[in-house]
Amino acid sequence: MAATSSSLSSCLLRDGGLGPESTKCYNAKQSVCGSAKSLSMPSRLIRHSMEAGSLSSTRSPARCCSAVETKASPLFTLGKKFHLDDVIEAQQFDRDTLNAIFEVAKEMEKIEKNTPGSQMLKGYLMATLFYEPSTRTRLSFESAMKRLGGEVLTTENAREFSSAAKGETLEDTIRTVEGYSDIIVLRHFESGATRRAAATASIPVINAGDGPGQHPTQALLDVYTIDREIGKLDGIKVALVGDLANGRTVRSLAYLLAKYENVKIYFVSPEVVKMKDDIKDYLTSEGVQWEESADLIDVASKCDVVYQTRIQKERFGERTDLYEEARGKYIVDSDVLNVMQKHAVVMHPLPRLDEITVDVDSDPRAAYFRQAKNGLYIRMALLKLLLVGW
Amino acid sequence: MAATSSSLSSCLLRDGGLGPESTKCYNAKQSVCGSAKSLSMPSRLIRHSMEAGSLSSTRSPARCCSAVETKASPLFTLGKKFHLDDVIEAQQFDRDTLNAIFEVAKEMEKIEKNTPGSQMLKGYLMATLFYEPSTRTRLSFESAMKRLGGEVLTTENAREFSSAAKGETLEDTIRTVEGYSDIIVLRHFESGATRRAAATASIPVINAGDGPGQHPTQALLDVYTIDREIGKLDGIKVALVGDLANGRTVRSLAYLLAKYENVKIYFVSPEVVKMKDDIKDYLTSEGVQWEESADLIDVASKCDVVYQTRIQKERFGERTDLYEEARGKYIVDSDVLNVMQKHAVVMHPLPRLDEITVDVDSDPRAAYFRQAKNGLYIRMALLKLLLVGW
Amino acid sequence: MAATSSSLSSCLLRDGGLGPESTKCYNAKQSVCGSAKSLSMPSRLIRHSMEAGSLSSTRSPARCCSAVETKASPLFTLGKKFHLDDVIEAQQFDRDTLNAIFEVAKEMEKIEKNTPGSQMLKGYLMATLFYEPSTRTRLSFESAMKRLGGEVLTTENAREFSSAAKGETLEDTIRTVEGYSDIIVLRHFESGATRRAAATASIPVINAGDGPGQHPTQALLDVYTIDREIGKLDGIKVALVGDLANGRTVRSLAYLLAKYENVKIYFVSPEVVKMKDDIKDYLTSEGVQWEESADLIDVASKCDVVYQTRIQKERFGERTDLYEEARGKYIVDSDVLNVMQKHAVVMHPLPRLDEITVDVDSDPRAAYFRQAKNGLYIRMALLKLLLVGW
């Protein structure tokens, strides 16, 4: 297990799956502190010239890197290096990459205090640049960094960052912050912000949620949790419950589940917040079985995972009547637990209000706090992979 | 001196003193990160079953643990372990526990940079979860943790914590944060919040002030400061001056002083903010002498400690006339100093406005900044005791 | 290179240059944590007695310390110690001190992860006390401290510090915080706040900007950047462009440039924000050539450095018409680049809006992000000098 990443990084990104705007080829990038030299020639230009050269256009929905062609062969054979540049969106990960990340995450679970493993990232500095507050996510990343011996520069609310308030562009902020740190964890209120940041930065950038867009580390920890709890990802049945229209969590999860074989997905949601057609069409095109149902009890009795989500009041505006109607419709309670199989689990991205009743918490099948903890291991794994490599 | 706490912890809590609702038996609790297993069976349930079993009811005002019976014998004899689970309220500490904490605090004063002692908590992670800002207290805890080699996850204002804003319960937040850290320092705006948090968490919780309720580490550092400055706690005379009705500081201090022999307390306060009867009755019932006086000069000449407090404007609402009348009434200035004994000291929980004049600062008897510094040692001691044990 | 500073510190401050109110003699001060003893006799009193004794009055514009007389001889001869107590204002530094700081900063550029150098400040604790947010500056200081192995207590917005909100004086806050840390980095909204803090504290204080007053570390990093980019400071030509009336950056830079030989300064600014007479008079008195010009292209073709600044909207109040007129007047774009010499550079204190067009960024002569990075090295150097000495 090499401690440093290959300088000749290969692009693992394949078919992003969702059409032209979501495919992107992740090219080689220096993974440690940009030198003065690299600053005088922005990495975005270096990339541009590479893209224009040996690589196919990023606009093409086709596979964009030659490395992709090796998909069929085992990924981590001797001498082959796995390299991750940035974490931008769930679609960026293929099945092999997911497996690799999960393997590292499992190692992370075993790291104990004051062992060499707990000092793996000693000397590295992570900047958490949060343009909107998200204490849960921020603490999870910061804990991950510190559990590996790394250090943190923290910003609870960078939106009030005087420079942003004065009109500085995100790109300029990133170029300043990359001079102070080795990796940037970005939370932003605008969709696509992380992609822009990653295009500018000469150090790795992780998307910790960008507006209505992506929250890829949440998607990763969800799939990881299913793997840890159920023991497999192929052949599983998953109920997605609650707000399926607005929740980026369930949308990302659906994308990732489509990478596994023989998965069946049930959508259980109030009429006003039904899963949108783009996801349904995508699942169909990928050969994933899905079904809509209004009967949570029936669905719960069949599934390995009941993934509950919060109905987001803020999406209903002044229509609080619609909100009240929607929120009470599908509650996971002891009745649901009673029909669930012994090995099945209840998951939730948190925070929860009353869509899972508190009496469910003490059942071993209530996996949501373990799920939150898995976020720590996934983030430890990503930080390790981005900073010191596979 | 064992580096790890006994797994068979004994409950040191005795009669809390203030009736049924303040007594509580602190039971065994895992001191490091809850495993997935413990999460699937909440510690609150584990405790409940224990309480129903071998231990007497927590509702009984009687001594609740057998360990209490050993009070007369020396506490730290060979082979006996001292174990602290949480720091919730001043009443939780008996005289022996206070002595033990002070002994550790004195050791903390001697710790120097880059010695093994300064790395005592290396690998441990403290989360400061502050639902209302209190920079002084937060920095004191964070400094304490870092002076012992520990690391910190910080939250300056968790009330804006997006999850809390979205309606997440404190209990759910605690269950998430306990997955990221080894100890939680909680500041909350609601009385009793720490008790609820401690009942949920599988890791230690320290109360850093919960609304009008408790601020036990302040009470501990006050008593520690008297011990350090005067050299004893039995037989001392203490003047409590200023806002005695609203200040939780002076109320907690009165409780703790009652644990010592032959203490005399003087109350000196404007009529509108007099000490309430519950404390007076408690002191009387504990055999503590107390007296109200309107003559600060006379009282100051007799006392070992003049404990001044700020008249809190926010308690007067629109009656600024009453506030103005109250605040100017008892000022500690050079006239007060002149009558004080040579060995006596002036204390103040800080911040001070003009209730102690600035010219007092340069007198060696002005102990308030030393008192603030003692807060560091007390918090270092508590963190040590909670994380690695006696 | 001694690891600890001399206990017999010498005062390096000479003629502050700008008349009585700016001269100050920096006396000996304990550099590590005030003991309880020192707290009982405030350092301000110790200083006062020293000033009244062996040292001349701080009110005198004349050289105030005998050590100053050694100016002509080399500063760092064997056995001589260089000691810095606080960083308060740009005028505090003479040419020798600047050279010394720059020499240390250059060493800082070479420090690599996990080398002994990167642990130089292990065990030291820096408190960043920011009364107004300035994420850029805060992260730069915190990164500097952590790159040297030190730890940080952070305050993003101390103005909401409950104590300050309750009316606590800055002095009282400082006396509390000095008990928790080894060095204080202060950002304040009031001019002179750092000087007051330094007069109170028994630990070093660094000014990270105090209102319209000073921002000395910015001035240092500007001069350092010129030295690094151009290779010299004597005989250079510098254009100061943009808001010269309100920008403390350009004012401080002008002061510092006056310490070098044969410097020529060009002022290029809209009429409403012209450089004020005090600076012009000062430059004249120091024998520095300066010239006002309205022709940026002409000036840019002659200069080694084009130092662009942002027109600060907030200074114009309701006169947005004047603001709009001023902001578009002098833009650094490809036309300006085209006339600039090959070795010349464009600098900017950041954040920039559109006063430098984005297409300039990719030119090697765009030095502003390197300049921001240099802030890291300068702050590392200052922390090292203040905490462990030369």
Image (cartoon, coloured by chain):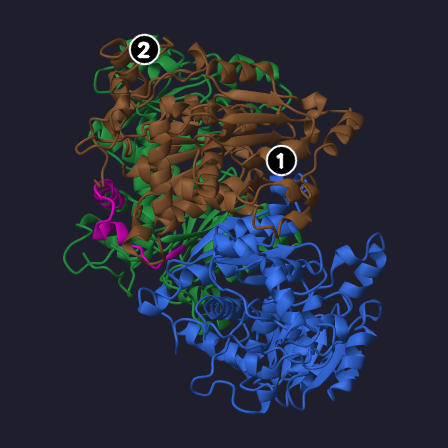
Chain colours: A green, B brown, C blue
Does C250 sit left or right of B264 as displayed?
Answer: right
Is A121 included in the stretch rendered in magenta?
A: yes
Q: Amino acid at mark 2?
A: Asp
Which portion, as a residue range, is magenta?
A101-125
Residue A143 visible in the snapshot = yes
In this rendered view, identify the residue nearer to me: C264 or C259.
Answer: C259
* Picture quadrant where residue C244 is located: bottom right
**Which residue is identified by label 2?**
A298
Q: Are marks 2 and 1 on the same chain?
A: no
Residue B322, x across and y down, in percent:
77, 25
Residue C215 within the magenta-colored segment of the rendering: no
Give the percent coordinates (x, y) of residue B81.
22, 31
**What chain letter is assigned to the residue under label 2?**
A
The residue depicted at 44 percent of the width and 12 percent of the height is: B21
Q: CA distance from mark 2 to mark 1?
A: 77 Å
Q: Nearest to the eye among marks 2 and 1: give it.
A: 1
Nearer to the camera, C72 or A250: C72
State which chain disc 1 sits on: B
Q: Which mark is drawn over residue B300? A: 1
Indicate left or right for B161 with B321 as reference. Answer: left
